[in-house]
């Protein structure tokens, strides 16, 4: 008994036209070791099969206009002329899936992309194709699409300045609703710079006090990358007061500024903005209010310390007075002081100093006669009170002795 091996038919036969005169059919072989071929016939000559002259691997291309439709058949080469393992498909004239459009070019501004292109190959008449664009940021996974257009240009709006975008384009034959061709190769373009957006994030300020003036340090954070919208060149600081206005500029890598010599009794306002080659952000505001003078602060400090010391001394004095008062209330009174008073009795004879004559008489008894000269001098002296002459006479006699 002879065994006969059945060759499987091709799978996924698909036919479409790139344009009205160029069509292609593709398939997947049922057995990769077997060669498959395609044939076709038109309704005008239904009984005549045409062999595909432009065979490629698992594909066949047809050239020439199709009036209404064409039947395409694919089968193993060994079965040609039979009906074994044959697969057929109807190819309508309007079953056209265009090749990608050509010459896609992009011109960018800060927030738009202006795209232009020409038709897919094989289309020479206008209004045969419709187009659609898609775009995304270069580092994003999500696409945005434009509405379908019949023209050969489109402006994509609402983009972010200074950002890389990827753009692709595809076409649809106007008579083949909903069936689009393949996307073009991506075109990568960068939008131009625009005015930076947002506000510069400011940090708390610090003051460095001197005797009569003050130095103020203002700081801020870098402008976020998404708000720069270009190459950040630096920061502008506008200092305003009732007396004058000052302008400062610092490079993009500097995020602080020390402003010296500000008066203490004047309010200042600093306006900080980031800028690039196109423009600058809205300013962030830093208010610098007045501050007290150091001398005044020191005097107030000394006054406060003095007042506190006086208060403490007063309170301690009050406490001591209360303690002493309580102590006195618990002590016995001291006896009155007694002073000795010497009194002479009434019957006691008073002391009477000797007079000169009495002293002299007493001395006469004791002295020899050779001392008459002194005696004579004493006798010639005038009488005086006992209180005074007694002293003189006594002194003279003692000297003589």
Image (cartoon, grey):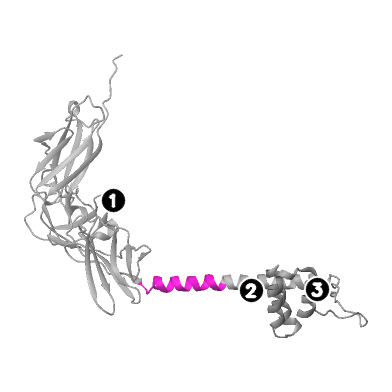
Residue where numbered disc 2 is placed: 314
The location of residue 149, given as percent across then percent down, is 18, 62
Measure the C-alpha gap from mark 1 to mark 3: 151 Å
Density class for disc 3 (Cα within 10 Å; few <14, some 14-19, many ≥20) is few
The location of residue 291, given as percent across then percent down, is 39, 73
Residue where numbered disc 1 is placed: 140
Specify which label sits upstream in the sequence, 3 or 2.
2
* Quarter placement of the N terminus: top left
Residue range corresponding to the magenta coloring: 288-307
- Nearer to me, 86 or 212: 212
Measure the C-alpha gap from mark 3 to mark 2: 77 Å
Density class for disc 2 (Cα within 10 Å; few <14, some 14-19, many ≥20) is few
For residue 281, side relative to residue 173 (left or right): right
Specify which label sits upstream in the sequence, 1 or 3.
1
* Quarter placement of the C terminus: bottom right
Q: What secondary structure characterizes most of the magenta part?
A: helix
Which image quadrant for residue 274? bottom left
Secondary structure beneath disc 2? helix
Residue where numbered disc 3 is placed: 362
State whether residue 233 is above or below residue 285: above
């Amino acid at each position: 008994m002879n065994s006969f091996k059945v060759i499987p038919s091709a799978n996924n036969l698909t036919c479409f036209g790139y344009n009205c005169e160029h069509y292609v059919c593709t398939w997947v072989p049922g057995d990769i070791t077997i060669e498959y071929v395609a044939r076709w016939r038109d309704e005008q000559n239904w009984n005549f099969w045409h062999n595909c002259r432009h065979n490629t691997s698992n594909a066949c291309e047809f050239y020439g206009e199709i009036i209404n439709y064409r039947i395409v058949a694919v089968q193993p080469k060994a079965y040609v002329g039979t009906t074994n393992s044959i697969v057929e498909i109807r190819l309508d004239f309007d079953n056209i899936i265009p090749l990608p459009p050509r010459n896609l070019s992009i011109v960018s501004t800060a927030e738009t992309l202006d795209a232009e292109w020409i038709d897919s190959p094989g289309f020479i008449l206008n209004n045969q194709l419709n187009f659609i664009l898609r775009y995304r940021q270069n580092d994003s996974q999500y696409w945005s699409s434009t509405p379908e257009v019949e023209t050969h240009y489109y402006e994509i709006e609402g983009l972010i300045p200074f950002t890389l975008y990827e753009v692709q384009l595809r076409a649809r034959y106007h008579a083949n609703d909903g069936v689009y061709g393949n996307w073009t190769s991506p075109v990568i373009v960068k939008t131009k710079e625009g005015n930076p957006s947002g506000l510069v994030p400011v940090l708390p300020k610090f003051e460095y006090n001197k005797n009569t003036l003050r130095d103020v340090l203002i700081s801020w954070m870098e402008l976020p990358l998404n708000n720069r919208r270009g190459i950040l060149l630096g920061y502008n600081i506008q200092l305003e007061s009732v007396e004058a206005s000052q302008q400062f500029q610092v490079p993009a890598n500097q995020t602080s500024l020390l402003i010296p010599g500000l008066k203490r009794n004047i309010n200042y306002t600093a306006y900080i903005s980031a800028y690039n080659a196109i423009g600058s952000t809205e300013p962030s505001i830093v208010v610098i209010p007045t501050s007290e003078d150091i001398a005044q602060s020191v005097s107030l400090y000394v006054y406060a310390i003095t007042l506190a010391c006086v208060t403490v001394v007063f309170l301690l004095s009050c406490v001591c007075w209360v303690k002493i008062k309580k102590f006195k209330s618990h002590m016995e009174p001291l006896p009155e002081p007694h002073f000795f008073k010497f009194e002479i009795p009434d019957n006691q004879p008073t002391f009477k100093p000797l007079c000169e004559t009495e002293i002299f008489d007493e001395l006469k008894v004791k002295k020899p006669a050779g001392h008459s000269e002194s005696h004579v001098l004493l006798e010639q002296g005038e009488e005086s009170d006992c209180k005074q002459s007694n002293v003189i006479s006594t002194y003279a006699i003692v000297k003589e002795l």
